Amino acid sequence: MQGFVEIGAVVLGILLRFGIPILATALMILFLRRLDARWQHEAMQSQPVDAEEAPIFSTLRCWILNDCSPEERERCPAFIEAIRPCWQVHRNGNGSLKEDCLECEILTQAPIPVPA
């Protein structure tokens, strides 16, 4: 009988030693997954669903201003990504604006973003 009590105490000690941290970790994972799902849902609610609902940065587009041909438009990243402003699409590799964009009417008339 004494052996069963000792074995039970060892098993209980092992369960407490490993079971509680595993249970706490599982509960934390569940909490973080639900929190992440809620944040993703909120982000999807605040973003436009398609290009028609996306903010229009300018009624004047660079391909119209530069009178681009249909062939040039098909190769132009600003025409392909019409949701984003053209000066964002045409940035240099280091992130700076191209010289042509600095004096462009589209960039100079763009609204200044207001911090949220």
Image (tube, rainbow, N blue to C red):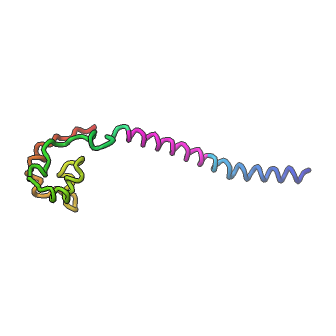
Residues drawn in magenta: 24-44
Percent from the top left, x then y, of residue 99? 10, 58
Figure quadrant of the C terminus: top left
In the figure, is residue 9 to the left or right of 74? right
Expressed as whole percent of the image width and height from the top left, the position of residue 2 reads 90, 51
**Residue at position x 15%, y 56% from top?**
70
Q: Which residue lies furthest to the front in this view?
A: 70
> In the image, residue 87 lies at what x, y percent?
17, 52
Residue farthest right in this picture: 1
Asked whether the viewer can see residue 86, the reply is yes
The residue closer to the viewer here, 25 or 6, is: 25
Count of numbered circles in the view: 0
Judged left or right of residue 1, residue 21 is left
Which residue is pictured at 69% across the width and 51% down the height? 17
Res 91 visible: no
Is 12 part of what is drawn in magenta?
Answer: no
Q: Of 68 and 90, which appears nearest the observer?
A: 68
Residue at x-position 21% and y-position 41%: 56
**Between residues 61 and 11, which one lies in front from this camera angle?**
61
As drawn, is 87 to the left or to the right of 4? left
What secondary structure characterizes most of the magenta part?
Answer: helix
Is residue 31 in the magenta section? yes
Q: Residue 16: x and y, percent?
A: 71, 48
Q: Which residue is drawn at 87% across and 51% down?
A: 4
Residue 69, image quadrant: bottom left
